[in-house]
Image (cartoon, rainbow, N blue to C red):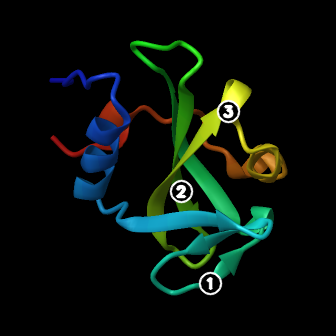
Amino acid sequence: MKREYSKNETDYIKKYQDEGYTCNFLFQEGSLIDSETKYSYPPEEIFIVAHHRYEGMSDPDDMSILYVIETKDERKGTHLIGYGPTADLEEAEFFKDIPKKNYSKNADINEIASE
């Protein structure tokens, strides 16, 4: 049975953490950095398992994307970015530079989550 999740990013982050996506990735100086190991990943070493878009409930301009990530060295985690008027353009370009072959077919959380 599929469970529905709120349109709040934290609900999805918690669910993915429960599924082993526990690394926190930060965007700094043109690359994605694992906050624990401090390894700096270029776009070609990033694989997008899923992504979820959100609009703010009180302000539609408050938009974000949650990326669910696996890396070439099998680290698993999430990264949340703003998009729309508040987007960091350098960060948005980084995600555009991830090769299309590194994106899954928009895996749904309910498909990868264990029952």
Q: Are marks 1 and 2 in contact (CB under 8 Å)?
A: no
Q: Amino acid at mark 3?
A: Thr
Q: Nearer the viewer, residue 40 or 45?
A: 40
Q: Which residue is mark 1?
A: 39
Q: Which secondary structure, mark 1?
A: loop
Q: Which residue is mark 3?
A: 86
Residue that appears at 42% across and 32% down: 108
Rendering quarter of residue 64? top right
Compared with residue 101, is residue 60 higher up or lower down, i.e. above or below? above
Could you classify mark 3 by the number of other residues whose Cα lies within 10 Å: few (under 14), some (14-19), or many (20 or more)?
few
Percent of width and height locating residue 114: 21, 46
Q: Are marks 2 and 3 in contact (CB under 8 Å)?
A: no
Q: Are marks 3 and 1 in contact (CB under 8 Å)?
A: no
Quarter of the picture containing the N terminus is top left
Q: Which residue is mark 2?
A: 69
Q: Which sits earlier in the primary sequence, circle 1 or circle 2?
A: 1
Compared with residue 17, is residue 82 higher up or lower down, i.e. above or below? above
Describe residue 74's horizontal placement relative to residue 32 as left or right. Answer: left
Q: Amino acid at mark 1?
A: Tyr
Q: Amino acid at mark 2?
A: Ile
Quarter of the picture containing the C terminus is top left
Rendering quarter of residue 4? top left
Q: Nearer the viewer, residue 71 or 81?
A: 81
Compared with residue 15, is residue 77 higher up or lower down, i.e. above or below? below
